[in-house]
Image: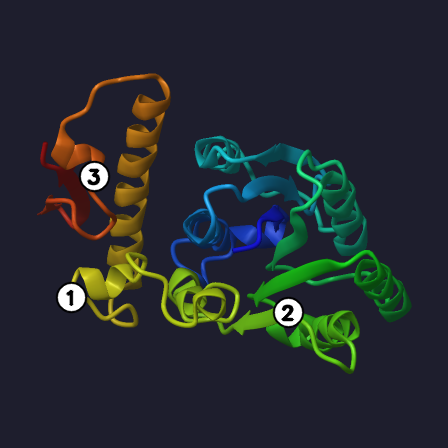
Amino acid sequence: MSQEATIIAVDDSDYMRNGDFPPSRLQAQNDAVSLICQSKRQRNPENTLGLISLANREVLCTLTNDSSKIYNRLHTVEPKGTISFCTSIRIAHLALRHRQLRHQKMRIVCFVGSPIMDDDKAMTDLAKHLKKEKVTVDIINFGENEANQQKLTDFIDTLNGKAGGTSHLVSVPPGAVLHDSLVTSPIVAGEFGGTLTNTGLGLGFGLDPNEDPDLLYALRVSMEDQRMRQEQEANAGATTGPNLATALPGTCPLTIYFVSSMLTLTWLS
């Protein structure tokens, strides 16, 4: 399998405070970024990942094969300002050009949850440049679908060209569970020819993601926190029991308590 260097661009604008993707666009995006990281690492352990922000136009994490660095920086992101799509994508491309392993293919995965203010010509010119540089771009459009759909469709069509390509646009309607929508999308499932294993958390818990998205989100966050702790302990050389070290998402024992309408999650050791 070919190796990839992937920069994930996250939307950190004020629009990410909206709650149409529960509990907020920002938190739903964080959950989806974790899925992207997991899929890339399962695809090839030698794949590297980086993180940038669209509003602050900041490189949050340079390319690394340590997913915990991505998660740690991701949770420091706070919504503020407006995005600059073209400028941020150029920064992502620059970061990819500085990858240490030159044989890695270059890919950008961009989350867009606020209106794109760049004009059509600027986006077309950027798409042509990225195509020339052999950069693949996957875009997750959510929250502002009507405002962005045509611009992003034209952008991806220009990237892929008449012969077709491997860049994708996935538009997720408000109210849907962002994570679950990506599990079966070409961005994740398309790479594997089927659904990525151990990421369908709704099915893993026997829950319908459309009926109780808040509960599913809480379960995912709890499992992600547990997985991050395991990674940090492993990186620090900590000794863990065999059951904990090999536990997979959706298979860890979990106790759920409801107290005064608040959800409490307790992992069993």
- Tell me residue 25's x, y (percent): 49, 55
Amino acid at circle 1: Gly
User: Which element is circle 3 on?
Assistant: loop
Neighbours of disc 2 within 10 Å: few (<14), some (14-19), many (20+):
some
Residue nearest the viewer, comparing 29 with 23? 29
Q: Dividing the image into 4 quarters, which one contains the C terminus?
A: top left
- Tell me residue 150's x, y (percent): 72, 78
Query: Viewed as shown, does residue 232 lie left or right of 243?
Result: right
Q: Which mark is residue 246?
A: 3
**What colouring style does the render use?**
rainbow
Neighbours of disc 1 within 10 Å: few (<14), some (14-19), many (20+):
few
Amino acid at circle 3: Thr
- Tell me residue 252's x, y (percent): 16, 45
Neighbours of disc 3 within 10 Å: few (<14), some (14-19), many (20+):
few
Q: Which mark is residue 206?
A: 1
Whether the residues at callouts 3 and 2 have beta carbons within 8 Å, the answer is no
Amino acid at circle 2: Thr
Please say if 120 is above or below 134: below
Residue nearest the viewer, comparing 212 with 50? 50
Q: Which residue is mark 2?
A: 166
Please say if 119 is above or below 29: below
